[in-house]
Image: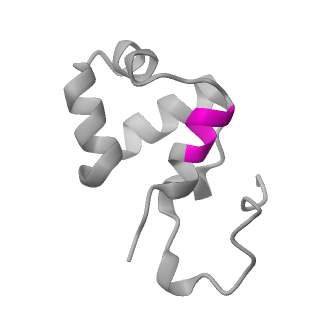
Amino acid sequence: MYSNQYLKAYFTLKNIKQSDIAKLLDKSTSTIRRKNDDLGFTQKEILLIHNKYNIPIQAFFYDADNDNTDNSTFPENS
């Protein structure tokens, strides 16, 4: 099952607010909240967020079912 736990952690660590993402993507804050919780971002949105905030692409596609590593670290930035 895919999870946004790494993505949410990056947003928190980099002090990125939902309103910042909403402004970048020209969406409402409530839309960003829904995308962040369960809908997910489009490829274009992922690239915009990645390029603006240097968040690793892997953070958008974290799969908890396939994670055999220590959850206290983030995936490497490729």
Quarter of the figure that contains the N terminus: bottom left
| Residue 8 spot, x, y in % from top left | 51, 45
Please identify the quadrant where the C terminus is shown: bottom right
Magenta-colored span = 9-13
Image position, residue 16 (x, y; %): 55, 24
Establish if 38 lies above or below 67. above
Question: Residue 38 occupies which quadrant of the picture?
Answer: bottom left
**Predominant SS of the magenta segment:** helix
Q: Which residue is drawn at 59% across and 45% down?
A: 9
19 relative to 35, above or below: above
- Would residue 56 be counted in the magenta stretch? no
Q: Is residue 63 visible?
A: yes
Query: How has the structure been colored for display?
Result: one colour
> Which residue is depicted at the point 57% across and 54% down?
6
In the image, taking residue 48 as reference, residue 28 lies left or right, namely left
* Rendering coords of residue 64 (x, y %): 50, 76
In the image, residue 26 sits, relative to residue 5, either above or below, namely above
Is residue 43 left or right of 26 when viewed as pictured?
Answer: right
Judge whether residue 10 is colored magenta.
yes
Tell me if 49 is positioned left or right of 43 in this view: right
Residue at 39% x, 46% y: name it. 43
Q: Is residue 41 visible?
A: no
Left or right for 54, reference 7: right
Q: Nearer the viewer, residue 32 or 43?
A: 32
Front position in the image: 18 or 25: 18
User: x and y percent of residue 56 in the render?
Assistant: 66, 47
